[in-house]
Amino acid sequence: AQKDLRKITPSPDLNQHARDGFHSLAYKMLYLAKRTRPDILVATHFLSTRVQKPTQADAEKAYHCLRYLNGTKDLGIRLNAFDPTHVIQYIDAAHAVHDNMRSHAGFATTLGLGVIDAGSSALNINTKSACESEYISLSDNITNAIFMRNFLIAQGYKDHPATVMQDNEAAIKLAANGYSSALRTRHINIRYFFVKDRIARGEIEIQYCPTKLMIADCLTKPVQGQLFLELRDLLLGYKKA
């Protein structure tokens, strides 16, 4: 991961030939990230936003990602399901990390070991606090967990609520209450509070997850060093949470 991944620095534009190559490379890596290497989703999301007018600095970030892939080409996703089989989803957000001050959300869905689905994307609205970023990310992404749960039930598996992991206790409280009682969060649009209804129906249950075990953290920002390696191994299923 690159600490300054999202930082846009002055750099010469690529020529047409190099621009075409960058465009192709960015989407090839995105294809790989969505299927077997979700640990590069943050990098590929950024690169895909730069394909219209890439610079030499963008190209170097792409090559950095390629060097990482080359050095870890034996890695992939290892899948295993816990018993009883049920959906576990990790949802996280990094507050105001983009140039337009929007936050970035990430989610990872698993049945035990290794992710069966993962995503990394910017929120489509600006938020006023980390709590609001986390809660909107939670609201936007739990539909994925509900779909996976309903699919398992249709296959004959036990009716078990999907477990949603969240590392922000204020966001968990908002979900449990179904409304905001604090001045700092009273402005949050009512449409995001459907989470409470899903909890009441028994479709999901929300549990606190320490940040160091929050797998989706590496899908929201460029995590560095040993923490990135530990979260990557949890994401790919080489390590049990």
Image (cartoon, rainbow, N blue to C red):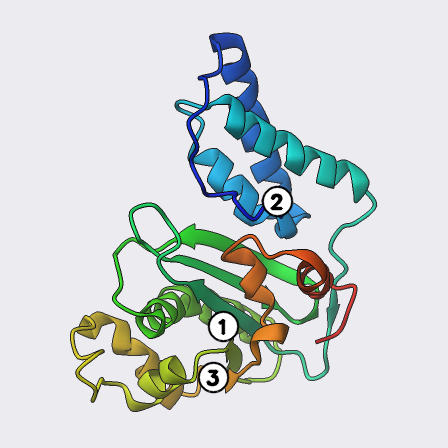
Alpha carbon distance from label 2 to label 3: 27 Å
**Mark sitting earlier along the chain (3/1):** 1
127 with respect to 214 (left or right) = left
Q: Which residue is mark 2?
A: 33
**Residue 180 spot, x, y in % from top left:** 22, 84
Number of the front mark, 2 or 1? 2
Alpha carbon distance from label 3 to label 1: 17 Å
**Residue in front for this viewpoint, 75 or 42:** 42
**Residue 114 spot, x, y in % from top left:** 70, 63
Tag count = 3
Secondary structure of residue under mark 1: helix
82 with respect to 87 (left or right) = right
Q: Within 10 angstroms of label 3, few (less than 14), some, or many (20 or more) residues?
A: many
Q: Which mark is residue 150?
A: 1
Q: Within 10 angstroms of label 1, few (less than 14), some, or many (20 or more) residues?
A: some
**Residue in front for this viewpoint, 238 or 198:** 238
Quick check: marks 3 and 1 in contact, CB under 8 Å? no
**Mark sitting earlier along the chain (2/1):** 2
Kind of residue at badge 1:
Asn
Q: Kindly identify the residue that appears in the image at 43 percent across and 88 percent down.
A: 202
Alpha carbon distance from label 2 to label 1: 25 Å
Q: Which mark is residue 221?
A: none
Q: Kindly identify the residue that appears in the image at 58 percent across and 59 percent down.
A: 218
**Residue 21 spot, x, y in % from top left:** 57, 18
Quick check: marks 2 and 3 in contact, CB under 8 Å? no
Q: Which residue is mark 3?
A: 206
